[in-house]
Image: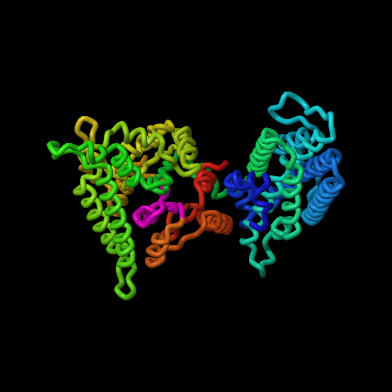
Amino acid sequence: MGAVPDAEGPARRFWVRFRKESVFAAYTPFVVCLASGRLELETFRHYIAQDVYFLRAFARAYEMAEECADDDDAKMSISELRKAILEEMKMHDAIVEEWGVDLTKESTPNLATVKYTDFLLATAAGKIEGGKGPIKIATPFEKTKIAAYTLGAMTPCMRLYAFLGKELQSFLDPGETNHLYKKWIENYSSESFESSALQTEELLDKLSISLTGEELEVIEKLYHQAMKLEIDFFSAQPIVQQTVVPLSRVQDPAEHQLIIFSDFDLTCTVVDSSAILAEIAILTAPKADQIGPENVNARKSSADLRNSWDALSSLYTEEHEQCIESIIPSEEAKGLCEALEQLSDFEKRANSRVIESGVLKGVNLEDIKRAGERLILQDGCPGFFQQIVNKKEELNADVHILSYCWCGDLIRSAFSSGGLNVVNIHSNEFTYEESVSTGEIVMKVESPMDKARAFKDVLSHSDNGKHVSIYIGDSVGDLLCLLEADVGIVVGSSSSLRRVGHQFGVSFVPLFTGLVKKQREFVDGDSSSWKGLSGILYTVSSWAEIHAFILGP
């Protein structure tokens, strides 16, 4: 991404906190088409016209902030930033002249442009959204505070454009001359623009030094609001050409059902569910001195359970690594399914050891449900599924969780606590006697083959057999489903998944890169369908990317 401000400053903290939302700008149809070099010229002309309105407001806001700054250094810095904006407007003038954009004939500012410019100029005038009215300017310090607030509303725009410039620069071939928007990308990926963004952030940090915690919270809210308004600005650019994003709008719900599958452990969760279930058993077990010699059928003590679980866990890790090594042949050629049969056998042996150990015996169902309600899911995961469920009818969507988890009640509780009761769960199940686990597990999904069978069974019952399937997973156990789906998305950075995948000819491509390539192919005459892309899996670093790809901002 390039340089960033001091790690201790508010500008850095705010960007780190809200950076994940930048993907909602990158994944807009406008930016994806722009990156591909296939954005229709008329759309870009409209964007330039809107951006001119925006830059004029930006320059005016800098001017107002300069008037509020209380020392010469700050005034000089703001003046330099304003000059940089005026230079940016000159670049727009060159584009206008080169492509024949007549700003006098272009449309008036659209709603998204007006919302951002009004917000920016109101902030620079001391009218803070959510406040009780304009800030009273009684002292030089009050004026400086307004300058800080104004920079808080401007900084995310600078950083977001620098971020997008760097992201899009990777799609420029050094020898390429026919990328229509090369000049635009080069400007925002340049060192000079990065320097302006960094200077803006450093100035925000400087102006914020004397502010109270409450005042810094105001700036954080302004920063976040500006980020959302900037995303809205990109989203509002009118696209008349067909695009590959967001997927939910590309596919016609009347013709195709959207079926989303996801693994659970370490795809949706932060911690593996097996460790959570074991911890419940250990914490609710009696201590050794509470077990009398007359009760031979009592649960193991918490100390004994801890020792048993540690031994099982260590053995699992060791044998799993050995299994992965055996799957990757150096000489003997194997098919993927044959190789994954070894993993299936290993998983079944490991599960049998857990059942035989009695570690999971005596766990109360209510304790499991409470643990599920408190289970920490990956950032952005609950929100994504909530949006899918809320728009279930509109999208003609269905959601299925395919998991090795030993206890479906844990998964159901984790999702139902967020109001996601309609998610379909395919997993293993504890057996109970009067709501207390017997230690036995009904094994339904304990291998890659089991997951693949459940996956295919769901698809076979989809509406009219017409569907678009998405599978989201993180491990070797998900590989068959990832490859069977129309779109396979890999969360995280499992080295074993990549090693096994590469061994069998699977390519791992960053999702955004794949979308840009797909947009190029589509405009150049290839099909827009995601079907038939066997052997390609798309990688993401966050659930925000999945949300942006499927649903948009």
In the image, 38 versus 66, the foreground residue is 66
Please state the extent of the stretch shown in magenta in the rendering. 468-492
Report x, y in % for residue 351.
24, 51
The outermost residue toward the bottom is 331
Q: Residue at x 32, y 58 (%)?
A: 317
Q: Is residue 210 left or right of residue 550?
A: right
Question: In which quadrant is the N terminus drawn?
Answer: bottom right
Left or right: 250 as drawn, with respect to 535: right
- Residue 130's spot in the image, x, y percent? 68, 27
Residue 525 visible: no
Magenta-colored stretch includes residue 490: yes
Q: Position of residue 85 (x, y in %)?
A: 80, 49
Q: Position of residue 194 (x, y in %)?
A: 72, 56
Whether residue 379 is situated above or below residue 171 in the rendered picture: above
Residue positioned 38% across, 45% down in the render:
264
Residue drawn at (65%, 60%), measured in percent from left and top?
169
Nearer to me, 448 or 441: 441
